[in-house]
Every structure is written in C-alpha cells, then in structure tokens.
Amino acid sequence: MRSLKHWWRHRSFKARLAIWYAATLCIVLAAFAAIAYETVEHRLAAELDRQLRIDFDIVEAQLAVDDKGAIKWPVRGAHGDDGYARLFAWFEVWSEEGQLRMRHWPIPEDAIHSPLRRPTAHALKFYDQEIESNLPARIMERPARIQGQGVIVRVIRDASDMRQTLAQILEVFAIALPLAAAIAAFGGYWLARRALVPVARMSAEARKITSESLGARLPVANRHDEIGQLATVFNETLARLNASFTELKRFSADASHELRTPLTALRAVGESALQEDGDARQLKEAISSMLEEANRLTELTDALLMLARLEAGASVQFEAVDLSTLITSVRDTLAVVADSKRQQLTVHALPERISTTGNAALLRHAFLNIMHNAIRHSPAESRIDVRTEIQSARAFIDISDEGPGIARELRGRVFDRFFRVDAARSRETGGHGLGLAIARSIVERHQGTIRILEKSAHGATFRIELPLAPAP
Amino acid sequence: MASILIVEDDPKTAAAIAEGLRRDGHETHLATTGSDGDTLLSQSRFDALVLDWMLPGLSGIDLLSRLREVANRTPVLILTARDGVEDRVLGLDRGADDYLVKPFALAELSARVRALLRRAETQEPTQPQVADLTLDVQRRIAHRAGAEILLTPREFDVLHCLMRHQGRVVTRAMLADAVWRDVPRATPLDNVIDVHLAHLRRKIDDGQSVKLLRTIRGVGFSLCAP
C-alpha cells in the first residue's frame, strides 16, 4: 500500500490524470455493460418464456387420456406422423405423484444420458438448465388438467441461440472496454499535456526571472481561465517583490549616501587640516566642523537603529496615554520654533481627554516629527493647524500646513525612508530624511495609520488615526 | 582630586576619556579588559569607575555584578552602545549609578562623573553668578548688570542648567535631559534647543560688550566669564 502510494506520488501530473481518466471510464463502462447485459438477457428470456407458454397451451390442448388411463398424443399429421412438426417444443408429462407419464424429446429414449429430475413444485416455474453439454435449455413447468386428470407439464426449448447472443455481447464488451479505457487514458494524457503546456512555458519563463530582472512578467494568454489566473497572481507577486526589492535597493543606496556624505566630509576636513600649518584657530575650526559631521552621523545612526528596532518589533511598554496632554505638550515644545518663523501653531478645540493605549515617549516622538515637519516645510508667517476629531472609537488628528504641499503621486512615498520631496533642499532644511518613516512606524505600532489627505488644496494635511482605549 | 578607574577596551576612546578626566583634575587609571579591571579594583580603592559594558572576556556588566557582590560601593558609570530601555534597566539593576550611551560628548561624560563624585559635596548656591549675570533660583529671576532679564520658564531652565555647569561645555543632550526630560536622539528637539539658545543669547548678550554665552561648534554651549 505504501509503495503504491509512493509510486503514485512519483508519477507526473499527466500520467496521474491519464490513469484517473482510464479508471473512471472503466468503472462507468463496466456498470453500463452489466446493465446492458442484464437487460438483453432478460428480454431474450422473456421472449423464450412467451414461446414456452404458447407451446404449453398447444400441448395441453392436444393431450388426451386413453381407456387405460394412459396419456397420449392423439394428433396425426398429414403424412401419418405424430404431427410434432407443428410443435417446436419438447415436453414431458409428469403425474402429480412425480411419475413420468409421457416424454417427447427429439432424440431416442435410450440416447438420453442425463434425464431431467422430476418436478418438485406444483406451480408455474421457469428455469435454465444445461441438458447435455453445449445444450442449454429454457424450461417451463406448469400443472395442468387433462380430462380431469391432474398432471404437471414440462415444456423445454433450446436456449443456445440466446446464450450465443449473450456470449457475443460479452465478447464485444471484453474488446470494447479495454479499448475505451486505453483511448481515455491516451486522451487524458494528451489533454493534460495540452492543458499543461502553458504551465510548462510559465515555469520556463519564471525560471529566467532573477532578482535582476524582477521587472519581467509572465505572458497571460487568457486571463479568464485558470492558467491565466495563475499567471496573473504570479505577476502580482512579482510586482510586489519587485517593489520591495526596488525599495530595498533604494534604501541601501540612500543609506550609503547618507552615511558616506558625513564620513567623506569628516575625512576631507581632517586631512586638509592636518596638511596645512594652520594656527590654533584654524585647527579648532576644522575640529568643530568634524564634530558637526560626527553629530550628523550619530543622529543618523540613532534614527536608523530606532527604525530597525521598531520594524523588528522590539518589545515596547504600553500604558494608558492621554493624547490631549501629549499633543498640547508637543505644541508647547515646538511653539518656540514656530514663533521663530513667525508661524502660528494652533491646536484647535481638543477634547478634555483622549485615552489611548500606547507608549507615551514613542507617540510623542511621532507627533514631534510630524508637527516639526510641518513647521520646517512651511514659509514664515503661515499657519499650522492641528485639529482633532473622535469618531467611532478612533481619534483622527489632522496636521495641516500652508507649505508647498506634496504632489499627489509622491504622497505614498513621503513615508519611505530617506525619501525627500526635493532632494536638492535636503541639507538646507536639515533633518536626516527618516522622521516621517519613524513616525509611520510608531503609529503603525499603535495599530494606527498615517497618511496625507487628498483634500488639501494648498499645503499638506497629515492625518494620524489612532484607536482609542476601550471605555472602562 | 579624585581617583578614577576607566575600564575600556578601545584604546582611542580610553585615552580620550582619561585625557578629559585628567583635565578636570582627576587622577585616572586604565584597564583594557574586565579581568584587569577586577584585579585593580581588588588591589586599591577608587572614587569612581567608568566601565564599558562590552569587554573581551569578563564583560563590564559581570564585573559590576561581582563588584556589588563583595559590597564594593564605588560609584559606577556604565558606557554602552546599547540604548534599549531594557538594557538601561538591566544596567541600573545590576548596580550602575549612571548610564551613558555611545557615542557621547566628553563634556557630558565629565559632567556625569562630576555628578557621581558630588554626592558628598556641598549644595549648589541658590544665587549662582557668572560675571555680572546672576540668577535667583527661588524666584526664578535673572539679572544682568543689575537689570532684570525677562525669561520664559523654558529659557530660565536652560540658563539655570548652563549656570550649573558654568565654565564648561553643556551639550544639547544634557540640556534635553535637564530641561525637557527627554532624549534628543533622532528627534527634532535639537532644533528646539537651538531656537531657545538663540533667544537666550539675544536676551543676555545683546547690547553687552562682554559676551557670556558661547557656542562651541559641534559640541554644545558654554556660559563663562571672560
């Protein structure tokens, strides 16, 4: 059983399908053949039985009892024979006590090797019996009355025609069934192969796709059939894979750029200071500049580590946090920066308490990043508004500014690591390009979302959505 | 003058720390492995220990546990690149008195060592003074050359912190910790601190011939008499 299973598992899909086809067809055909055979046999037997009944009627009508009480066949033919020529049947007449009273067989009495046994039942009865070898017979027994004398008449007909017909049917089935099974197996194999050709082509195509050519797609012949659906799904997976690969590549490129820039500056400033015989003031200047670059590197490393930790799902302590207090405190912290640009940083009508569950330090960090981002990218004397809304156990905090806004097609990407709307301005406005990515990681860590609203006509509106703590 | 043991395996870092602490007037001793540190600690008494967490062989944290097991109460400042909250908790649980994450400014290290050693020292004055700038800590008022300077609460806290460390460099990290009770790392807090310092400078030094508040580029700020 186990080896059969093993064997089965090692067949190709085509072979298995072919075997399935053949087996199924065999079962169906065998059932069909059995029913057909039964039906034909029944029909033929019924026909014989009908003739036997006619025979019986003739025999019963002709028989007579003579003076001595013997049963005779009084019919005389035109040629002086017994007149049996009109009768196709052979018959026997038995007394009710089981004594043979008369026999009419087409062979002489002494040639009968195996006489039929005496009838047992006193009722109408049909049955088959092989009288001699190769001589099948259909037999009918029925009680009759001949001139008041009760007898049992047995009528017999040769059934070899019927048997022969049935044997021929069997022969046909015996040839047709394996043939049909073979055709089915072949057809199944062929069909499967035909159906699997696109799959084989797909696997050949897919094998060619490497991390270098993730942009390639499988051909979709018909997107409505199963193969087409498979190719479509595969292509979608490829697209996702490609996107994350591209993102990874971009991240590595950006990270190395961001890390190497301060390192390069560090080296260059150090080397040039070392080579020149500058005075103490110049050397101090060089060292200060190097320290600034070291600070940039520190900041970048901290941000990268923080992101990595957030994304790796490091354990964070969650507790009850009041968002109202948190937002107000972030506003208080950043107000001085906004003031220095003569910007108006307004937190609008905050509910007394917005209870959520989270890590206060992380959430504070996220809000600091988003609100500081708004301040940084807004012109002097503009407004930054923070509006909060509570809807079905979620808090929606909108931070809108009057800055240049973010082009529709870039909105999904501003939260990517190191993504900058305007690469040229990155150093001028400062920051490490990870602030929004960190904010998003933090918010998502709190089962929230962060996105840029579509409606903002001028400026950008960042919406932070956070689940509220369930009411106690 | 205090005697300080530094256990740090990176020679450059160790040398820089030793140099910085020597300039502060301390006597420094150096061990480059945990077991060397252990030997030195069992031989003589130190006023403070600057201990690197990750050391070849006996790690800093194990050395610390061993130290506390034999009831050695020497104040310990742990240096580490591990800044996770759980690392911090582990370090303090094992008996560290303070915790400094690498990379750090030497100014901050020396301030923390000072704080470790100050335990027994006198209270800081309630009216600190730098040149003609005075601070009334109780009433939260500042005067320069007899004239009152109007300060916001945050500006006062920043000035107070600078006053406490007068003559020395105060880093942004130190200000963030002292005034905002926050870690500035990877946050926009640096920007906030810079704006406060700009305001403070305007209020203290504008129109004065002697400038007291200095920016030490790449390190931080310093309030000192000329």
Image (cartoon, rainbow, N blue to C red):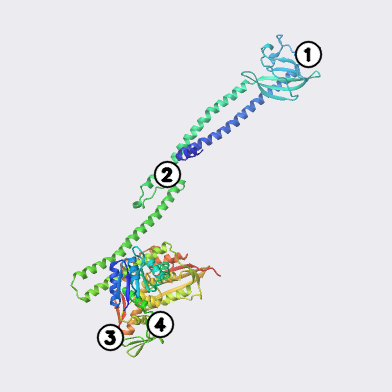
Q: Are marks 3 and 1 in contact (CB under 8 Å)?
A: no
- Counting from the top left corner in percent of width and height, residue A461 is at 42, 69
Classify mark 1: residues with Cα within 10 Å, few (<14), some (14-19) or many (20+). Answer: few
Quadrant hosting residue A464:
bottom left
Q: Which residue is mark 2?
A: A199
Classify mark 4: residues with Cα within 10 Å, few (<14), some (14-19) or many (20+). Answer: few
Query: Could you tell me which chain the residue with mark 1 belongs to?
Result: A
- Residue at 28% x, 67% y is B11
Look at label 2 and name its amino acid. Val
Cα–Cα gap, marks 4 and 3:
25 Å
Cα–Cα gap, marks 2 and 3:
84 Å
Query: Could you tell me which chain the residue with mark 4 belongs to?
Result: B
Element assignment for label 4:
helix
Look at label 1 and name its amino acid. Ala
Look at label 4 and name its amino acid. Pro
Q: Give the numbered dot on residue B69.
A: none
Q: Nearer the viewer, residue A285 or A104?
A: A285
Q: Earlier in the sequence, mark 1 or mark 2?
A: 1
Element assignment for label 1:
loop
Side of A115 where A240 appears, left or right: left
Which of label 2 and label 3 is nearer to you? Answer: 3
Q: Earlier in the sequence, mark 4 or mark 3?
A: 4
Q: Which residue is mark 4?
A: B153
Q: Are marks 4 and 3 in contact (CB under 8 Å)?
A: no
Classify mark 3: residues with Cα within 10 Å, few (<14), some (14-19) or many (20+). Answer: few
Classify mark 2: residues with Cα within 10 Å, few (<14), some (14-19) or many (20+). Answer: some
Look at label 3 and name its amino acid. Val
Q: Which residue is mark 1?
A: A70
Cα–Cα gap, marks 3 and 1:
166 Å
Evaluate whether residue B158 shows in this view.
Answer: yes
Residue that protrudes farthest toward the left in the picture? A277
Q: Which residue is mark 3?
A: B210
